[in-house]
Image: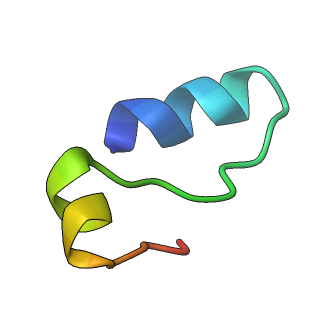
């Protein structure tokens, strides 16, 4: 996840949501 936020910062982007298959399967969503 650190890589995701670093890449977003380098490209002046915003990370809106992250998840993986296990979280999706369980109905869990990470907002930040």
Residue 30 drawn above or below residue 13:
below
**How many numbered markers are drawn?**
0
State the image quarter where residue 9 is shown: top right
On the image, the x and y values in percent for residue 11 come to 78, 21
On the image, the x and y values in percent for residue 6 come to 52, 32
The single residue placed furthest to the right in the displayed view is: 12
**Foreground residue, 26 or 31?**
26
**Foreground residue, 30 or 9?**
30
For image coordinates 77% across by 47% down, the residue present is 14
For image coordinates 55% across by 75% down, the residue present is 31
For image coordinates 53% across by 71% down, the residue present is 32
Residue 11 drawn above or below residue 19:
above
Quadrant (top left, top right, bottom left, bottom right) of the N terminus: top left
On the image, the x and y values in percent for residue 18 come to 46, 54
For image coordinates 66% across by 33% down, the residue present is 8
The single residue placed furthest to the front in the displayed view is: 25
Query: For this view, does 12 lie left or right of residue 5?
Result: right
Query: For this view, does 21 lie left or right of residue 11?
Result: left
């Amino acid at each position: 996840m650190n890589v995701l936020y670093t890449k977003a910062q380098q490209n002046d982007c915003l990370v809106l949501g992250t998840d993986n298959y296990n979280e999706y399967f369980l109905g869990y969503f990470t907002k930040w």
